[in-house]
Amino acid sequence: MKKMISLALALAMGLSLAACGSKDAKNTETTSDLAYVQDKGTLVVGITEFEPMDYQDDNGNWVGFDADMATLFAESLGVDVEFQLIDWDSKTMELDGKTIDVAWNGMTLTEDVKAAMECSNPYFNNAQVVIVKADQAEKYQTVESIKGLNFSVENGSAGMEQADAYSLTYTPAQDQATALLEVSSGTADAAIIDYLMAVASTGEGTSNPDLTYTVSLADEQYGVGFRKGSDLAAKLNEFFAEKYADGTMQQLAEKYGIADKLVEQ
């Protein structure tokens, strides 16, 4: 009888350990963001409207340097790409809640961003610049000259950080495109946006021919953000290196007029 009880206990313990081992294996699998994305079959990319990085063409397709690279990256993983418009100030929360898998939208690699996300290597040099009406640009060529202006800046952006750093008066906007619209319509005196967007979106031949950029407030670099600890960041770094080596990144940067700011991978 004692032998039977001992055998039953041993069997129960074995089943329990097997179950725990199975659970641990499952947990180990789910810690891989790469496996998670490949299992569900989609890479959800968090973006805002930001020419020349992410914007819609005449057919409603998302294009731009970042959009094109994200599409190619998803293909390399064997999954579909899905672009999701988000409130940029909530990007970390969107990542952690798995509403998106990656924040890929000309994101400045600030210390706060690097602390909150698993980031890729830098891939573009950039700056934060002041946008004003072109016919008033001569008056606003120094930091001192812009201090009395009312600004529009994207909520949660590097532009907002610069507005705070220089103690400027501002109203948060949904995105950088909206900030430009505020200046063009006269509801704001100026905006602070990314240099790369300023090149593509202001001046003759753009959607904002009446606007121009003047003062540069900060030099910075772009990176791509994943959930903290995500193995997708290393995978993207490998992808960047491959696409830089074969010329793909240079070709896309030239296509969107920003090749001079591309960082070697």
Image (cartoon, rainbow, N blue to C red):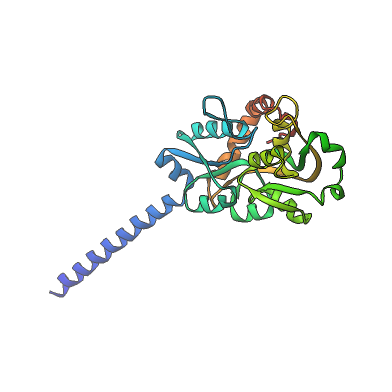
Residue at the extreme left of the image, as rendered: 1
Residue 166, horizontal then vertical, whole percent: 79, 54
Question: Which part of the image, by quadrant, shows the C terminus?
Answer: top right
Residue 68, horizontal then vertical, whole percent: 57, 30
In-front residue for pair 223/57: 57
* Residue at image point 56% right, 52% down: 90
Residue 204, horizontal then vertical, whole percent: 75, 26
Residue 149 seen in render: yes
Residue 264 seen in render: no
Residue at the extreme bottom of the image, as rendered: 2
Say how many tags the image has.
Answer: 0
Quadrant of the image occupied by residue 65: top right
* Residue at image point 38% right, 57% down: 24
In-front residue for pair 77/50: 50
Question: Which part of the image, by quadrant, shows the N terminus?
Answer: bottom left
Q: Left or right: 71 with respect to 165? A: left
57 to 48, vertically: above or below: above
In-front residue for pair 5/155: 155
Quadrant of the image occupied by residue 11: bottom left
Q: Left or right: 82 with respect to 19? A: right
96 to 221, vertically: above or below: below
* Residue at image point 72% right, 24% down: 205
Residue at the extreme front of the image, as rendered: 186
In-front residue for pair 234/100: 100
Residue 71, horizontal then vertical, whole percent: 53, 32
Q: Left or right: 149 with respect to 107? A: right
* Residue at image point 63% right, 34% down: 53
